[in-house]
Amino acid sequence: MAERINLLQVVNGLAIGGAEKKLLELVKHLDKRRYSIMVCSIGQGGPLQKDFEALDIDVVVCHKRNKFDLSLINKVARLIRECEIDMVQTTLLLADLVGAFAARWSGLRPPVISWETVSHGENDILRTKSRHVWAYKAAMKRVDKIVAVSREIQSSLIQRRGIAPEKIELIPYGVDLRKFTRRNGTFDKRGELKIAGDRVVIGTVARAEPYKGVAYLQQAAVYLVQQHPKLDFLFVGDGSLRKELEAQVRALGLGHRIRFLGFRNDVHEIMNAFDIFVLPSLTEGLPNVVLEAMASYKPVIATAVGGVPEAVVEGETGLLIPPGNPAAIITAIKRLTSHNKIALRMGEAGRKRVEEFFSLQREVGSFDLLYQKLLSEKRGA
């Protein structure tokens, strides 16, 4: 058997965020017979560290001494040399900067892939913090490929960041289809959550932060539950707005109808308690949770931002609405709750779409092909 490829994954911290969780999923499913994987968290560790370590791989945390700690580059460069790294992949901005320069300074110059997972809208750090622009452009010159998770991000990289199209590889997120499935006795959470069988449940899974638009969904929920006695809402996710939104609901006496469950590890099971899934985000890349809802046979109502329209086909797998608009959320929910057959048909179509275009097997296979291509080009150079 050929020697395993030494693959270094550099990430900016191990928080419970979308990009970090997708990295964990990718590392978990790469073929360990082919890849010897090391994860280097720069800046700080985080709660996901134990999950990476549970995969029986090496995890190194390089703590940041100050805001602009250039020693991180030397630390990662030394790691690349000592571990004879063949390939470097970076996730999130600080990791992009440190990983790209470290690979060059290591002397080995392994191919570098930047995994671009976030939207480049108004919250783009390179629009709001110009001091990062020079460093980012210099780093990207040292990167071999940038992986975009959606066509929207691909376009943004070209138009807003000036990246050459040929440097970008499109690899959409994928969902583990074995984990997300139709409701059955094992995964039915309604009993545990004390939800009566005749209730219609509208659910979301999102951080309780302003950019996720959960306040707009809460406004819509308050109106709808007072109009429809059998309609309930479940908010899954924690964040800075949770206590405030929860207090507002309790003050109205609606706490039993609009419930905030906080952070959960059983999202794949809770998803099956929903009848309709809503994502009211103001900005997005390609939201994995939308794909998970579709894989769970749920019709989706989501804002038409970022890469969302690439997943949700209007009128076929769900409904697309403008961001920051509670009235649009209300109208969409009324439409699907009033036409159950349409909602069920959308759920079936969503599952088929994920199976065809957004499976985890397809995502991992695409990364594997990219790794092999870059290594082959380096060896042939």
Image: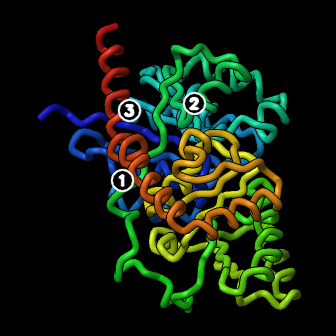
What SS does tag 2 mark? Answer: helix
Disc 3/disc 2 C-alpha distance (Å): 30 Å
Provide residue 187's location: percent of width, then percent of height: 40, 78
Q: Nearer the viewer, mark 3 or mark 2?
A: 2
Which residue has dot 1 on it? 28
Q: Amino acid at mark 1?
A: Lys
Choose between 98 and 261: the one closer to the eye.
261
Q: Nearer the viewer, mark 3 or mark 1?
A: 1
Provide residue 177's location: percent of width, then percent of height: 36, 56
Of the image marks 2 and 1, the number of the one nearer the N terminus: 1
Q: Residue at x 44, y 52 (%)?
A: 349
Q: What colour scheme does the image use?
A: rainbow
Choose between 253 and 286: the one closer to the eye.
253
Disc 3/disc 1 C-alpha distance (Å): 19 Å
Choose between 217 and 108: the one closer to the eye.
217
Dot 2 and dot 1 residues touching (CB under 8 Å): no
**Left or right: 76 as drawn, with respect to 238:** left
Q: Nearer the viewer, mark 2 or mark 1?
A: 2
Q: Residue at x 65, y 19 (%)?
A: 158
